[in-house]
Image: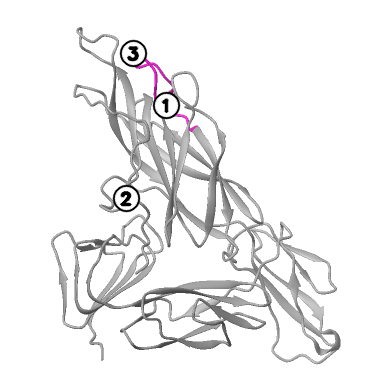
Amino acid sequence: MKSPVIGSGLIFVGIVLFYATGAFAQTSFKLRLVPKVIACDSAIVSVEIQAPDSAFVMGNANLRIFYKSAQLANPSIKSRNNFSSGDYFSITSLTDVGADTSVFTLNILYRGEQGSGTTVGASWISVADVKFALTETNTSKCYDLFFLPIGASRSLPNTVITRAYASPTVEEPGRTLTEEVNGTFTNITNQCSLPIVAIAKAPTINAGEMAILTLSSQNGVFPATGTITGEAPIQLTRAEPIKMVSGRNSGGKGWSISGDTQNCTISNVITITPETPAICPGTSITMSASGCTGTLTWLGGPSPQTGSSVSFSPAVTTSYSANCSTGGSGTFTIVVATNTVAVGYDVITGKERFKAVTTLTSDKKVGHVTFSPSANVVYEAGNAITLLPGFAAEKSSTFQAEIKTCP
């Protein structure tokens, strides 16, 4: 079974936290991700923080940015903008890559004395700029990035931020203490780097005739520029997301549209069904793909197969890919049921299917109210499905448990 979880063993790097209690003003933070640069093959975001209630001196922190492995890859620090000199060591990073979900951690390391350091106040402060590569399979050029609030998951690591302050006791006047600060997060959902423009026309037009063509934005990214074959460029804006133009059907070949604001090539979007394949041992499943204008080649089995639909019969859970000769590809994993299954992680977002021959148990969470798309999870077992204390399905999620016997 593929795991959408990355290492839950991520820990503070070179950080020792000291805690103390006392009567302090209410302190909290807001942490946000802000898109800065979008390009054909990469995206840069800014990590920013503020203190809406009461200013505090930044102490140690682990800022954990989750991303989907199918959308983004190879994160790196583009620039360290604060908390990297003086009372702080230079910000370090750590990447933990998972099958479905990965995490990039920014580590702020405090070394000040007597509570000195950079103050987080009402104005937004940039911590760092982070660059991600857009994967080749991410044909839509859209991506999601999110932080995980404390307590949202028992199997995924959370973001932790502390404040630094001087010891209030007479006995230790020079000692610096740190205290964990609560906060809220602003994530990035379905941020698209490239505009996608579609063209619609009358179904039957004779060669040489004129027709009214409708150009429309498909993902809300503006400005978007499209060029009808043989015509002048046409720009769509947020104020005018749809335009109707006339075009001539030359030689009975119809129309095509090309170009975008960044002159990137958008590959075919390959859709594979079923989305979450799972089979019993010793059985097979037919997988289908659409969206390819060339030849589809399926890889991952004993030998390559071609065609829009092929059959697979793996003995164990196996990952495959469907690759189009004219561009575009898709990946998927066929889950082969084992005798018993104990669900090992929370599913915060996306679709997952767990399958057991006899019994399945789970004490994990399904979904989270702050994440989109909502989780869609299916539990299947031949004899029994047991939901243990700790299991929960958020109201925004879709959860299904079904008894399905294997032959």
Q: Position of residue 346 (x, y in %)?
A: 29, 60
Q: Nearer the viewer, residue 301 or 166?
A: 301
Above or below residue 47? Residue 285 is: below
- Residue at 37% over, 74% down: 317
The quarter holding residue 112 reads: top left
Q: Amino acid at mark 1?
A: Gly
Q: Which residue is mark 1?
A: 121
Mark positioned earlier in the residue sequence (1 or 3) = 3
Q: Position of residue 45 (x, y in %)?
A: 54, 45
Mark positioned earlier in the residue sequence (2 or 3) = 2
The quarter holding residue 385 reads: bottom left
Asked whether the beta carbons under mark 1 and mark 2 sit within 8 Å of each other, the answer is no
Left or right, 15 with reference to 139: left
* Circle 1 or circle 2, nearest the eye: 2
- Residue at 44% over, 19% down: 87
Q: Which residue is mark 3?
A: 114
Left or right, 289 with reference to 317: right
Over which residues does the magenta segment extend? 109-125
Q: Position of residue 51 (x, y in %)?
A: 38, 31
Q: Which residue is mark 2?
A: 8
Q: Amino acid at mark 3?
A: Gln
